[in-house]
Image (cartoon, coloured by chain):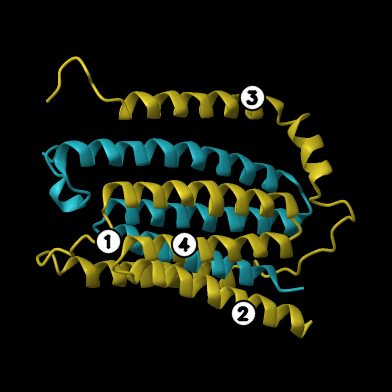
């Protein structure tokens, strides 16, 4: 019982600290690395919540592919350092104030609305890749196929956006 | 088991940090990473709710969210690269020519 709580709070502290580190880093490469730590801890949370397939997808797609893309673009553009603007200083305190208000609101909703029911014990095959696959290819077959079209459209769109226009060089 | 409300609270904190990042950072790439953080907070909530009710639907939705996020990241980063090519900057305060 306490072991679960210790594990949860340890991981939660790592996740929140990594998110704060991402926000506070001056260098965008450090931000990306902090975000990878955060994604990895969220992957462990998925494992704790009985979602091993989603956890693996999280690690390979998010912490792997997406963050490699981020790091690649950061280094391609050489955009590690963007100086914070001197003006517009009033935005930051206001943003922090609004963020605190959002946290308080959600805390009131979570802990005041009686949503604190205990987690039910799951079936033994809950969340394993076979069950996910059965669900994905029966009830969710159409969304799955639409996802493939979406990914193809994104791929074509990216190629078109980043293509050099050879006919009229600027 | 950890009470599920703890997961809600963690998800809310991560979402708020992502929103804060969108508001206070001016580097377009870091703003984009903050959006990914918010998507992940929502995913965590989906999986926590799926576990609470013993339903698999939440995990399937997370699968689709991850697929859409991958497409979104590819298109968004391509846009950032295209903007950098024409403007030589990723600072959002300097990319304001469409402002009314």
Chain designation of label 3: A
At which x and y percent is residue B44? 60, 58
**Residue B63 versus residue B48: which sits nearer the camera?**
B63
Chain designation of label 2: A
For label 2, count other residues whose C-alpha is less than 10 Å away and answer few (under 14), some (14-19) or many (20+).
few
**Residue B23 versus residue A170: which sits nearer the camera?**
A170
Q: Which mark is residue A35?
A: 4
Q: Which residue position holds label 1?
A: B25
**Mark 2 / mark 3, whichever is N-terminal:** 2
Chain identifier of the cyan chain: B
Chain A colour in the picture: yellow
Chain designation of label 4: A
Helix, strand or loop at label 1? It is loop
Q: Is residue A8 left or right of residue A96?
A: right
Q: Quadrant of residue B1?
A: bottom right
Helix, strand or loop at label 4? It is helix
Q: Which mark is residue A145?
A: 3
Cβ–Cβ under 8 Å for marks 2 and 1: no
Q: Which residue position holds label 2?
A: A10
**What residue do we see at 51% from left, 61% from top?**
A36
Q: Quadrant of the N terminus of chain A?
A: bottom right
Cβ–Cβ under 8 Å for marks 2 and 4: no
Q: Is residue B99 above or below residue A91?
A: above
């Amino acid at each position: 019982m306490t072991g679960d709580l210790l594990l949860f709070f340890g991981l939660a502290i790592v996740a929140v600290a990594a998110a704060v580190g991402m926000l506070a880093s001056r260098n965008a490469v450090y931000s990306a690395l902090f975000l990878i730590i955060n994604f990895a801890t969220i992957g462990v949370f998925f494992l704790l919540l009985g979602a091993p397939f989603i956890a693996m997808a999280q690690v390979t797609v998010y912490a792997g592919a997406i963050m490699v893309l981020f790091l690649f673009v950061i280094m391609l553009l050489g955009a590690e350092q963007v100086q914070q603007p001197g003006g517009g200083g009033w935005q930051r305190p206001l943003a922090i104030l609004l963020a605190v208000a959002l946290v308080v609101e959600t805390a009131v909703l979570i802990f005041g609305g009686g949503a604190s029911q205990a987690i039910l014990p799951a079936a033994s095959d809950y969340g394993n890749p076979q069950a996910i696959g059965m669900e994905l290819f029966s009830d969710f077959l159409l969304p799955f196929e639409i996802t493939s079209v979406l990914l193809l459209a994104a791929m074509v769109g990216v190629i078109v956006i980043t293509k050099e226009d050879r006919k009229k060089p600027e | 088991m950890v009470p599920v409300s703890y997961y809600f609270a963690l998800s809310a904190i991560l979402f708020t940090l992502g929103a804060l990042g969108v508001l206070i950072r001016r580097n377009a790439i870091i703003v984009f990473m903050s959006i990914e953080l918010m998507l992940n907070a929502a995913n965590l909530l989906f999986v926590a709710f799926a576990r609470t009710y013993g339903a698999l639907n939440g995990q399937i939705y997370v699968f689709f969210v991850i697929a859409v996020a991958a497409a979104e990241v590819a298109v968004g980063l391509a846009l950032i690269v295209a903007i950098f090519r024409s403007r030589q900057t990723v600072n959002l305060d300097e990319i304001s020519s469409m402002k009314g």
